[in-house]
Amino acid sequence: MISEKNLQKFMDLYEKEYGVKLTRQEAFNLFSRFVNIVRIVYETKD
């Protein structure tokens, strides 16, 4: 589960880097995709 604190950090970083303010739903979707990609990469290394 994505914590509210981490979601807000992601939103802040995304806005700082790309100049785009995401809605909570957009941020949740992007962040969860990112987490899934990281999981896949680490699972394939085992």
Image (cartoon, rainbow, N blue to C red):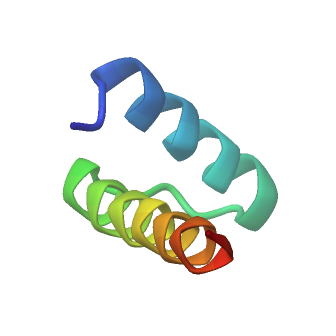
Horizontal side of 20 relative to 30 (left or right) equals right
Position of residue 23 measured from the top left corner of the image (x, y, whole percent): 30, 55
Using the image, determine if residue 15 lies above or below residue 30. above
Specify the quadrant that holds the C terminus: bottom right
The residue positioned 52% from the left and 70% from the top of the image is 43
The residue positioned 61% from the left and 66% from the top of the image is 42
Specify the quadrant that holds the N terminus: top left
Using the image, determine if residue 7 lies above or below residue 42. above
Give the number of marks: 0
Q: Which of the 4 image quadrants contains residue 17?
A: bottom right
Q: Nearer the viewer, residue 22 or 1?
A: 1
The residue positioned 26% from the left and 48% from the top of the image is 24
The residue positioned 30% from the left and 65% from the top of the image is 26
Horizontal side of 30 relative to 24 (left or right) equals right
Q: Which of the 4 image quadrants contains residue 28?
A: bottom left
Residue at the extreme top:
5
Position of residue 18 measured from the top left corner of the image (x, y, whole percent): 73, 66
